[in-house]
Amino acid sequence: MNLSYYIAKRYLFSKKNRNAINIISGISVVVVAVATAALIIVLSSINGFGSLIDEQISNYAPDLKIESLKGKTFKIEGKKFEKIKKLNHIKYFAEISEENILLKYGNKQTICTVKGIPDDYDNFFNLNSALREGVFKTSGNTLNYTVLGGGIAYKLGLSVESQKAVSLWVPDRKKVNMLNPEQSFKHISLIPAGIISVDANFDMKYILTSLSLVRKITERNSKSVSSIEILVDTTRNAELLKSEIQDILGEKYSVKNIYEQFDVYKVMKSERFAAFIIMMFIILIASFSIIGSVTMLIIEKKNDIFTLMSMGANIKTIKKIFFIEGWMISFIGAFSGIVLGGLICFAQQKFGFVTFPSDGMYIVDAYPIVMNTGDFVLTFFSVMIIGTLISMYPAGKIKNEYIKDSETT
């Protein structure tokens, strides 16, 4: 067995002479363990919220979205778009037409966006699961139907059960009447068929109706779209398909994957990075306790150092003993923190003991937790790197003075 490791282990785990040094070493282990566990919990919590956002957004967000970089509409005619439709891995190709509108209901009104979707849209997007009231219906034989975001419905005080129509108003670009502004708008009545709730952004922004109706009221032809939404057969093919489509269309169009379509993913990524850096600073500060623990141990074991030197041990061996001592404190603290953090996260997943206020306004009742192996590995090695660097400092302070002192005694 390595002599330095053996002596360092004896100093740390010896059952005899339990004094202040042992207590301080124990406190150092606990401090590092708590900080490590906190980092695991924070990262797992951020993962949980990210997973929750993924689950909500995946109900209505396409895997890929094509938009024009010039103007808010473009025409899907020509060989390029025909070629795109024939590409492998495309599960669904949806033409979308959007327009900002004024929506009136009784004596209330709001500005929102009407999104015209194909009749089979709900067969591919899981919007039925987001229904809070009514049915998902955007077209009919004789009547025009719409499905509203929950935030818009709440703002208008709308209920599907009332069967009272909403009025959709859009500017008439061919007729402008300054004396009577209402005559500068075209309007159409829609029957609210359902109310959906996906997320705050969607709920406060969109109402859904048929693609043909939006094209009609905005006077766009059958080849004009605001965007194209594409679903891919498997998620792993999304990036490959994105590159192929971008190569076909060129620089005049943008092709965005699901993470590029929503700023929330950028925010989550930034928050995760910021949380990691902040927690690493806390772990760094917590690890400074190792310096105090090892330094006091060096002072206490000064006679042992002289004895080892008189037996032939060089200064390098002495330094290694106390370096390993600090490294072991860091290792035990990191390992214990990983286990503790994992157990707390598992308990939260299983029992959900940390909950949101019970007012029914949240999608989930308890804080979501998702544990990733990568987070555990990253945390452990990050803590160990800090612990290793910290342990080098007090060990490096043992200088040749001890040799001189040992020669004079």
Image (spheres, rainbow, N blue to C red):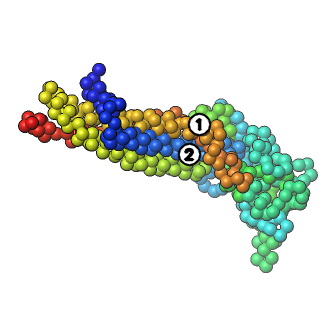
As drawn, the label of residue 265 is: none
- 343 vs 187, nearest the viewer: 343
Q: Residue most toward the front?
A: 17
Q: Earlier in the sequence, mark 1 or mark 2?
A: 2
Quadrant containing the C terminus in the rendered view? top left
Quadrant containing the N terminus in the rendered view? top left
Q: Secondary structure at mark 2?
A: helix
As drawn, the label of residue 346 is: 1
The residue pinned by badge 2 equals 46
Q: Secondary structure at mark 1?
A: helix
Q: Residue most toward the top?
A: 1
- 152 vs 288, nearest the viewer: 288
Q: Residue most toward the left?
A: 408
The x and y percentages for residue 215 are: 78, 54
Q: Is residue 297 left or right of residue 171?
A: left
Reply above or below: 18 against 165: above
Query: Label 1 is placed on what type of residue?
Result: Phe
Reply above or below: 152 against 290: below
x 59%, y 36%: residue: 346
